[in-house]
Amino acid sequence: MTAPKTLDAPYVPPRIFGPQYRTATLGILLVVTLIAFEGMSVGVAMPKVSAELNALNLYGISFSAFLIASLFANVVAGLWSDRRGHTVPFLVGVGMFVAGMALAGAAGHAMVFVAARAVQGLGAGATIVAIYVMVARVYPPDARPKVFAALSAAWVVPAMVGPAVAGFVTEAFSWRWVFYGIIPLVVPALVMLLPALRQTAGTAGEPSSGPRSRPLPMSLAATATAGGAALLLAGLTGLQTSPVAGTVMAAVGLVALVLSLPRLLPPGAMRFGRGLPTTIMMRGLLSAAFFGVNTYIPLVLEEVKRFSTVQAGMALTFGALGWSLGSYLQSRKVVPAHTRIRRGAAFVTLGSLVTTVAMIPAVTGWIMVPAWIIAGFGMGIGMATVSVTAMKQSPANEQGANSAALSVTDMLGSALATGIAGAIVNVIGHQPDQLATGFVVVVGLMAVVGVLGVSVAGRVKD
């Protein structure tokens, strides 16, 4: 007699807010929300910071310092996560982020503020890489798109209230409380996340033996890359006051960058090799095309279109909402990954170009709102898809290195775009009509980067 056949239970996709993953999901989202508040708030407050500290010529560097420091922390935290797990890098990163916020709030000089932004960047860089590795190790592959969509959705509340709150606090009290006010939020976030960190600690597995797993060479390469980017941007920023010194600094920085950056990325990334190398590089192209414009939207709206601080933040608010919508739609996987990434780059480019219409004197600055919804929508589609695809293309013991590589291209793309845009604005001038011209030039340059992303996105396929 044969045994009766039994039907296997139908497969139920994991729920990221189900009992098994609820604690980890809530903890991760709380921390991302905290970092999102900082990101949205600083962008709105920066015009006032620059005015009070007499540092409009350092406007771009204030953002780039954060990003370059994050780049260095990305690599170190990625190595650390692959070898020892993600718990300690995460906790150290959060601690440094808070210290940077306190220092920024207390800054009385422009260079102190720039240094504070660098400390924030070190903390944020370590934290983000640890979160990426946590997602890859805690959640099964078919749940990760939902997690990355939830991470983007965690920007919704900060996007809705962050710019308005930052604008109100800046105008009613001081820009300093934009930084101080975030610090108390750390305690409840960590209290909720500590159980999840204990639950997932020790899951790092055997570290990779590849070239990007060697701590000393990778740390030296990260130092040279970050230092090269800093020298390049400092040289470009100083061209007006010291042309010879600025040129030498920029040249030395560029050489250091070209020689060291390939060591931090998968082989073939600099030539857009098929598969993972291009996936990693697409992160940088998307970030450069978007944030090279995004950073200067509050400045031109306030100085050229005479918006209030609160009004200037509205464009960033709706852009972040578009980002969340795009991220949600990408999680449905209705088209192949490379197609989604290409469409994302196209939307970013289109939205950026539309913003230039606002620089026509007779046109209202509110045209920035629909324009930046389009650009944010493209980022939501492209960035979340890149993250999911990169983790899918990564061996388990290289997830930390590839998470770091994603963040390296992300931060470097944003830092170079923001810094170069700042140098362009400084050269053209800071008067309202000059700022409008500089913004149009910057958008044109970033649109070229976006078009490059559209053209190479197909190489994401293996």
Image: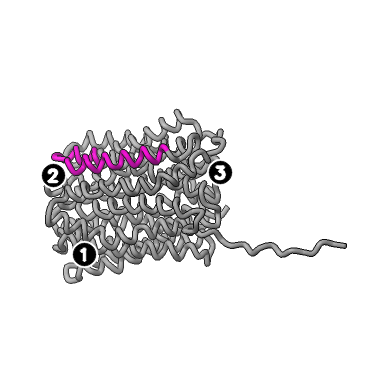
Crowd tier of the residue under label 1, counting other residues whose Cα lies within 10 Å: few below 14, some 14–19, many 20 or above: many
Q: Which element type, helix, strand or loop, lies under badge 2?
A: loop
Q: Disc 1 or 3, which lies upstream in sequence? A: 1
Q: Which mark is residue 396?
A: 3
Amino acid residing under circle 1: Met
Amino acid residing under circle 2: Leu
Q: Are marks 3 and 2 in contact (CB under 8 Å)?
A: no
Vertically, is 458 above or below 51? below
Amino acid residing under circle 3: Ala
Residue 160: x and y in percent read 28, 63
Q: Which residue is mark 2?
A: 53
User: In the rendered structure, which segment of residues is drawn in magenta?
Assistant: 88-116
Query: In the current view of this chain or complex, which residue is farthest to the right?
Result: 1
Q: Which mark is residue 359?
A: 1
Relative horizontal placement of residue 290, taking residue 173 as reference (left or right): right
Residue at x 15%, y 54% (from the top left corner):
170
